[in-house]
Image (cartoon, helix red, strand yellow):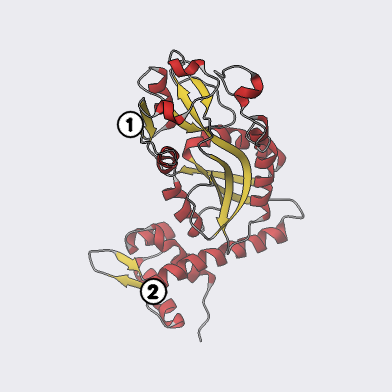
Amino acid sequence: MADVTLRQLELFAALPDYETLSAAAVHLHISESALSQAITGLERTVGEQLCVRRKARGFALTPAGQHFATQARRILADTRELVLDTQSGGKLRGPVKLGCFASFATSIVPAVVDGFPRRHPGIDLEITVGTHEDLLPDLEAGKLDVAIVYDLFLPAGYRHREIYATELEAHLHPDHPLAARDAVDLADLADEPLVMYEARPSIENTLQAFAARGLTPRVAARVPQIILVQALVGRGVGYGLLMSRPNTTATSVEGRPIAVRPIEPSATRTNVVAIWPEDMDLTPRAAALLDYAVEILGCYGRQAGHDGAGSPAAAAGSPRDTRG
């Protein structure tokens, strides 16, 4: 059986990122005919069709080709790790590709990017922000080392490490009657206009929280960004339901104050976690990144009172208009 070269693996591993062989060839600095020949050579070696090539309609990977491309990326990543380990002299150096769920990225990414490079100057940190629909396929394809997401509605097949605890909170205009309370019941919110954060898994989480109480929310607006939820709440359009986050203040992007209240009885308590495919091992660099994230963010859930000791509002004895 003919040997498979690293160059062949490199070429094939890049194919899922492109719709045509010509586009892939340009990126890979190779002629289209040479790329096509490399694919044909791989197919002969493995004894299966990996790619369906259609004139004027691009190409498509077969299921075997998709699996081969994923495995090729992992082999290339392991090869890079071997080289880096040999060259590093005991110090961590090389890339880490971190994915972060969009809704809390502004609460996590600045703190990580600010401090982590000072601790490990040899590590090149690359950040991708998106939803589950963006991050999970990139993890499976080997484009990300690890992703930080909510531990909600995740498919099987991932290892995870807890970063901090979080819970669903009500965001209200300060003049809203319910803002005078220490905590808010979902039953009192059901007939109020809800500004829905329209992203998964937040949609499912919100609807499930109401359904568990036999309630249905009255949705007044659906927006794709948390800052828009807060902006509309700050203008009194409705209330929002958002998971608690570190490093935030209770103001809208326009500088308008927002009253943040815990939900009682508690609607959703969960964790923000780092995840990666269970058939992949974290690189030492990715593991160091998670150690740092837990160090600077892990105390948040305990400080906020999400450890079961009672709500933050009850502990303070007064309503909360800010979150530190």
Q: Which of marks 1 and 2 is nearer the N terminus?
A: 2
Q: Position of residue 119 (x, y in %)?
A: 71, 40
Residue drawn at x 45%, y 30% as measured from the top left: 186
> Which residue matches tag 2?
50
Q: Mark 1 — residue?
A: 219
From the viewer's perspective, is 18 left or right of 310? left
Q: State the SS at label 2.
A: loop
Q: Which of 209 and 58 is in front in this view?
A: 209
Q: What residue type is labelled 2?
A: Leu
**Relative to 23, does residue 7 appear above or below in the rendering?**
below
Residue drawn 39% across the image and 74% down it: 50
Quadrant, the C terminus: top right
Q: Residue drawn at (46%, 82%), measured in percent from left and top?
A: 45
Where disc 1 sits, the SS reads strand
Residue reaching furthest bottom?
1
Residue at mark 1 to residue at mark 2: CA–CA distance: 47 Å
Asked if residue 8 is positioned above or below residue 161 in the image, the reply reads below
Image spot of residue 206 (x, y percent) = 43, 38
Q: Few, some or many C-alpha atoms within 10 Å of disc 2 (few <14, some 14-19, many ≥20)?
A: many
Q: Which of marks 1 and 2 is in front?
A: 1
Q: Where is residue 12 in the image (x, y as percent from the top left)?
A: 44, 67
Q: Would residue 176 be found to the left or right of residue 306 on screen?
A: left
Q: 292 or 195, which is in the foreground?
A: 195
Within the image, what quadrant is residue 229 found in? top left
173 above or below 199? Answer: above
Q: Which residue lies furthest to the front in this view?
A: 214
